[in-house]
Amino acid sequence: MAIYVESYKQGGVNMDLAAQIRQNTRSIRAATYHSLVGTSIDLLQSIYVNADVAQILAKMQTGASLADLEPLEQARAGPALLAAFRSFDNVLYQYRNGMLDSEMWEGYRQVMHNYARIPAWAEWLRANRGLFTPWLYEELAPSLDSE
């Protein structure tokens, strides 16, 4: 009888531990999502608050290559693109490590691929691919070649 009671107590502890792990996983996922949204908002705000950066990105979206930009525009475009691709790399990292569910990943993935199809963005990523994880380049490669 004592063995049965001890086994039951341990089973209860294991069930409590499993519930705590599930709750912690949900909390981590929620914090990850919150962080990704905050990063996205910060990136977008840096564009719409700064008219110069917004104008540069608009030029690129309408077909300007990096070579078409003035030297000062190139100097501003580089950090903006670095920030965007770092954010994309982080999203992919979070997804690969189970912190972002597949539905949310698909939304972010679509945004990443849409930007990677812009010729100037693709050109910049090809020239700077070593700054990011190999997984980001592998993920975006089909869009980089879809010009």
Image (cartoon, rainbow, N blue to C red):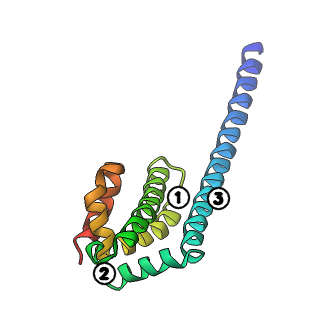
Q: Nearer the viewer, residue 8 or 94?
A: 94
The spot of residue 14 in percent (x, y) is 68, 30
Circle 3 SS class:
helix
Amino acid type, callout 1: Asp
* Residue sitting at x 44%, y 72%: 111
Q: Nearer the viewer, residue 23 or 122?
A: 122
Amino acid type, callout 2: Ala
Q: Is residue 118 left or right of residue 13?
A: left
Residue 66 lies, with reference to residue 30, above or below; the image says below
Q: Write down the residue under mark 2.
A: 64
CA gap, disc 3 and disc 2: 34 Å
Q: Residue furthest top?
A: 2
The spot of residue 46 in percent (x, y) is 57, 69
Give me the disc on residue 101.
Answer: 1
The spot of residue 98 in percent (x, y) is 50, 49
Q: Write down the residue under mark 3.
A: 34
CA gap, disc 1 and disc 3: 13 Å
Depth check, mark 2 against mark 1: the one in front is 2
Depth check, mark 1 against mark 3: the one in front is 3
Give me the disc on residue 126.
Answer: none
Depth check, mark 3 against mark 2: the one in front is 2
* Residue sitting at x 47%, y 46%: 97
First along the sequence among labels 2 and 1: 2
Label 3: few (<14), some (14–19) or many (≥20) C-alpha neighbours in 10 Å: few
Image quarter (top left, top right, bottom left or bottom right) of the C terminus: bottom left
